[in-house]
Image: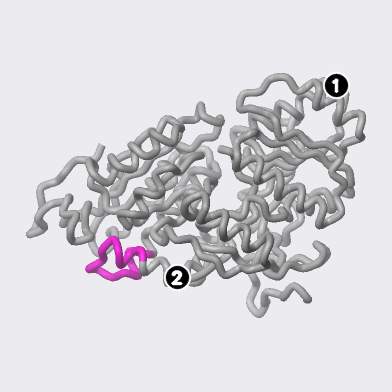
Amino acid sequence: MRRVVAIAVMAIMVVGVAGISSAGAQGNGRQGVTGSEIRVGGLASPVSVLNVPYVDGFDGVNAYFDIINKQGGVFGKKLKLVAQLDDQGAPSGNIRAVRSLVEEKKVFAVLPVMTNSFAGGSYLASKNIPTFGYNVDSGWCGTVAEGAAIQNDVLKNNIFTGQCPRKSLFGQRGSFICFSCAQIAPAYVAQQEGLTKGAIFSYTHPSSVACSVGAEQGFKEFGIDLVYEDKSLEFGFTDVSADVQAMKDKGVQFVTTCMDFGGAFKISQGLKQAGVDDVVFYAPEGYRADTIKKFGKQLNNWFFGLSFADWQSKVVPKGTNAYLKAMKAKGISPSEQSQAGWINAQLFVEGLKKAGKDFTQQSVVDAINSITDFDADGMLPPQNWTSDGHGPGHEDCTAYVEAVNGKFVPRYGKPGQPLVCFPDNPRAPTLDNPYYRPLKPGETVPTANG
């Protein structure tokens, strides 16, 4: 199951060619398809919303499309990102943007969706538009009530068969997130570093608060003493003096946050200004080359948990190598958001190819929902879109890096196997026996009982 820390966080209508009537022939399920192109469009929130580079998602999509187009495209048609809209980081803007993509830009598919709020998910699902993006919001699964029902079944009834109803929406790490489920990653870092006294911080945003509940449960489940917590912080907060003093008084050794990097960094700086330099931070967001370059040694004692293979290991998966090579060729600094766009584009292309040359929007959705082992060439733990992709999964995998003197250094994984994994549903009783992905030939996934 994906127990992730969430951040509460100009197309032209074309006259048909070679007998194709128009790119906007919506009734046949091939809107946006011409004799030579498959047209898609995406949207992103501005960087100013949470200081997260959501717009990088467009770079990832374009880079992957360039590779496919150089190979002749898909069924002889080039892939084209014809619209890159800004949703202003607001739910109303998100809804306007997705409607514009479908009704005005006449796109075949929507990708990438790179936003902290996916209010437009309902509209896209109702139109059955193949949609791909960066999943940090429950809108990828369904309504708040629909997502909560699956989550409550997991938490209260030990039922793991619930499925998200929005089957045409495909997040880069699946479409279901159990925000309040016990998180393994922060507790695992604390255990590995021999730390027992923890603190948790979140924003007042509902997703951030729910994430803090998951962090609490993870601490409780795996023996980390929660000695301080603050769920009252607002976006853009400035004063952390009271929090810093409380952490000093309680001897906090380890901090995990359910917020963006900027918010977590303010807390870290507050501690250092108070003379506390040895507290370890676990961060769910901020793994970017420009971050480590800018802050350097100020990030010592920071660990980052990743839902994908890291970029610093000596041996990286095939997909990671291809992504990093493409970014270098374009002079673009890698980021989690551009990589998510790359993964979105790869899944879309696999869906197109699997649907066949007479593909429609419906057949692409159906094709993806029949894929049982999408891992973006080793970048991700395998996604089974027949079940786990739209519901609770059966393993928990994270790659870890530590910031050390201005560099990200991989931790806890094995050579060629950066993802540290545990069985889930049911879960192993301890974190003593992880397994590692990508699996090597002959290796199998252990059960919760070994």
Secondary structure, magenta segment, majority class: helix
* Residue at far bottom of view: 442
Out of 349 and 138, give the one closest to the viewer. 138
Q: Give the label on residue 371, or none.
A: 2
Q: Give the label on residue 159, or none.
A: none
Q: Position of residue 43 (x, y in %)?
A: 38, 40
Q: Residue at x 46, y 30 (%)?
A: 46
Q: Position of residue 331 (x, y in %)?
A: 47, 37
In the image, residue 77 sits, relative to residue 328, either above or below, namely: below
Image-based side of 33 in relation to 279, left or right: left
**Callout 1 amino acid:** Ala
Q: Reading the chain from its start, which is encountered first: label 1 or label 2? A: 1
Q: Is residue 166 magenta?
A: no
Q: Residue at x 43, y 41 (%)?
A: 330
Q: Position of residue 205 (x, y in %)?
A: 60, 36
Q: Secondary structure at mark 2?
A: loop
**Callout 2 amino acid:** Ile
Instruction: Report the span colored magenta.
Output: 351-365
Out of 364 and 57, give the one closest to the viewer. 364
Task: Check disc 2: other Cα within 10 Å, few if <14, some if 14-19, many if 20+.
Answer: some
Q: Residue at x 45, y 49 (%)?
A: 133
Q: Secondary structure at mark 1?
A: loop
Image-based side of 39 in relation to 223, left or right: left
Out of 345 and 228, give the one closest to the viewer. 228
Q: Which residue is mark 1?
A: 274
Image-based side of 82 in relation to 26, left or right: right
Q: Position of residue 361 (x, y in %)?
A: 29, 61
Residue 417 at least partly seen: no
